[in-house]
Image (cartoon, rainbow, N blue to C red):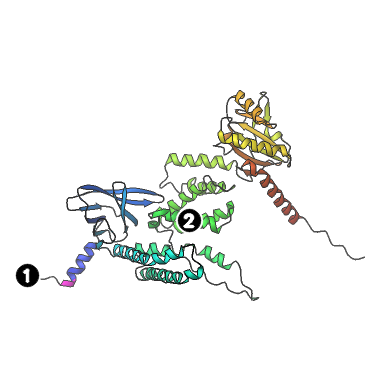
């Protein structure tokens, strides 16, 4: 009989294993039997069930499939409970043996070094936490002075240093593992000291600019495993980038979005996800004027067909409708004219107003929030601090309801009935899907503010006029110099 050399046989077996398609994860869990379990995973802020298995009388079960699983954190589900987490990365043919109730402490992994690292690191952290507990208790004791807490603080710092050193060791030795990638993503960026300029002074903006440029150094935005993490890790990191490192102005946020998308574009899944979460963040932004970001994202990535590989026709139409509605009423745009009947059935045009400012106020007589906001607007209007006229649009078809509302609220401005329009529905001209909605328009019919609470109008216009006056002063030409004579 001809013998195959041992090393050749080992090579053949390892190659065969490496080439195994799909996934096959076998479990034996003591204390679990005759039930159904599920393999769950995260995606953004949601959780999903990927696979189902039946546990036999010996606690054995298996999840398998022909298509490899996406990398990320997965978890075992029993009933409605998330029993324990695991990582899924390169090796997707392995086994896990453990017992209830302490799954982590009793876990034995065969065939996957990544999960071995994951559980070993978890146990290391648990041990360090137990070691730190008495020191934490002292540090949280409000009856003790800082001097009395000094020893506990030093001890806690040493324990924390052990944890960080342990994590750095894993990252250095096993950089490609899911465990190392996850740990690295949680480590803060080390910012270098600012260099000195030629004149010996320090560039005060260097560190901020450097930090912004290197914000994603420890987290690859093209790694779709980060989408499949607890706590919406990918989304939260991107939103932190937008919120903390860029001024809340449309142009600067658009540049930030382009930075994120360019980093994510190498992977179709992260490309899709980065565009989607950016779009959703600015669909109904809390900060005035940032709806222009939504319009930009729609125009560049959806209107062009760039996202057609995943978005369906219905969603694309909904996005288009919203973007088109927003684009007509963006800050800086000319406000579309409204011509509607007042309570005497007389046509009234918003463009006929000649005041310095027009307040477009869209309300519904039956709207509870409107009943709170309208008196605040009446109070602002009656102060006559600014040259303002209000053009109020009632969303209700009833003229009688509008008349009663005008009388009850003592509204002395122009009020018209929205459905009795000569220029089409106001909803097609302005972003006003909810009531009340308020726009501020200048004497050139440009939109300068939107969706401002009525009790903030005075502050808004005061600030706006201060900025405009400052701009006028900056643009004023200095007087021409005259020669001595």
Whether residue 399 is visible, yes or no, is yes
Can residue 4 be found in the magenta stretch?
yes
Position in image of residue 162 (x %, y %): 39, 71
In this picture, residue 228 sits left or right of residue 27:
right
Which residue position is annotated with label 2? 238
**Farthest residue, direction front:** 143
- The reply, left or right, for residue 122 in relation to residue 294 is left
**Rendered position, 26 above or below 411:** below
Of residues 11 and 99, the one drawn nearer to the viewer in this rendering: 99
Residue that badge 1 annotates: 1
Residue at 13 percent of width and 70 percent of height? 4
Q: Secondary structure at mark 2?
A: helix
Give residue 395's quadrant in the image.
top right
In the visual, does 334 lie left or right of 313?
Answer: right
The x, y position of residue 270, in whole percent, is 42, 54
Q: Which residues are magenta?
A: 1-7
Give 186 or 301, whichever is nearer the viewer. Answer: 186
Q: Earlier in the sequence, mark 2 or mark 1?
A: 1
Q: Main secondary structure of the magenta part?
A: loop
Question: Residue 46: x, y in percent?
Answer: 39, 48
Residue 6 figure quarter:
bottom left
Residue 167 appears at what percent x and percent y? 38, 68
User: Which mark is drawn over residue 128?
Assistant: none
Left or right, residue 482 beside residue 392: right
- In front: 213, or 118? 118
Establish if 17 lies above or below 235: below
């Amino acid at each position: 009989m001809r013998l195959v050399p041992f090393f050749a046989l080992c090579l053949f077996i390892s190659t065969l294993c490496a080439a195994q398609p799909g996934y096959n994860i076998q479990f034996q869990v003591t204390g679990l039997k005759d039930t159904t379990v599920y393999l769950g995973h995260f995606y953004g802020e949601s959780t999903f069930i990927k696979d189902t298995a039946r546990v036999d009388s010996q606690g054995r079960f298996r999840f398998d499939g022909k298509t490899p699983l996406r990398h990320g954190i997965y978890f075992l589900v029993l009933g409605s409970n998330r029993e324990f987490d695991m990582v899924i990365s390169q090796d997707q043919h392995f086994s896990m043996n453990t017992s209830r109730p302490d799954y982590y402490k009793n876990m034995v992994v065969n065939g996957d070094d990544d999960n071995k690292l994951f559980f070993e690191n978890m146990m290391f952290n648990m041990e360090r936490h137990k070691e730190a507990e008495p020191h934490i208790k002292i540090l949280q004791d409000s009856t003790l002075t800082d001097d009395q807490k000094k020893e506990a603080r030093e001890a806690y710092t040493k324990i924390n240093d052990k944890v960080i050193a342990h994590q750095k060791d894993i990252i250095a030795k096993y950089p490609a593992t899911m465990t190392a990638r996850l740990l690295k993503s949680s480590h803060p960026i080390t910012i270098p000291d600012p260099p000195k300029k030629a004149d010996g002074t320090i560039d005060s903006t260097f560190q901020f600019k450097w930090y912004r440029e290197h914000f994603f150094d420890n987290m690859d935005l093209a790694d779709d495993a980060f989408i499949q993490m607890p706590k919406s890790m990918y989304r939260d990191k991107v939103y932190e980038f937008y919120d903390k490192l860029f001024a809340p102005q449309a142009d600067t946020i658009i540049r930030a979005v382009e930075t994120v998308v360019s980093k994510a574009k190498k992977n179709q899944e992260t490309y899709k996800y980065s565009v989607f979460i950016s779009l959703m963040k600015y669909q109904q932004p809390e900060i005035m004027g940032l709806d222009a970001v939504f319009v930009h994202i729609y125009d560049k990535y959806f209107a062009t067909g760039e996202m057609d590989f995943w978005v369906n026709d219905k969603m694309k139409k909904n996005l288009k409708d919203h973007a088109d509605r927003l684009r007509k009423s963006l800050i800086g745009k000319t406000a579309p004219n409204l011509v509607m009947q007042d309570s005497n059935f007389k046509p009234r045009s918003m463009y006929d107003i000649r005041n310095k400012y027009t307040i477009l106020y869209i309300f519904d007589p039956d709207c509870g929030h409107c009943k709170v906001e309208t008196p605040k607007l009446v109070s602002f209007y009656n102060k006559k601090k600014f040259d303002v006229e209000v053009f109020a649009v009632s969303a209700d078809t009833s003229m009688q309801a509008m008349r009663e509302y005008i009388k009850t609220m003592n509204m002395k401005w122009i009020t018209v009935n929205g459905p009795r329009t000569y220029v089409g529905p106001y909803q097609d001209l302005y972003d006003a899907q909810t009531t009340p909605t308020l726009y501020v328009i200048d004497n050139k019919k440009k939109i300068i503010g939107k969706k401002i609470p009525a009790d903030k109008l005075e502050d808004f216009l005061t600030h706006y006029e201060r900025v405009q006056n400052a701009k006028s002063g900056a643009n004023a030409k200095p007087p021409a110099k005259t020669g001595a004579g």
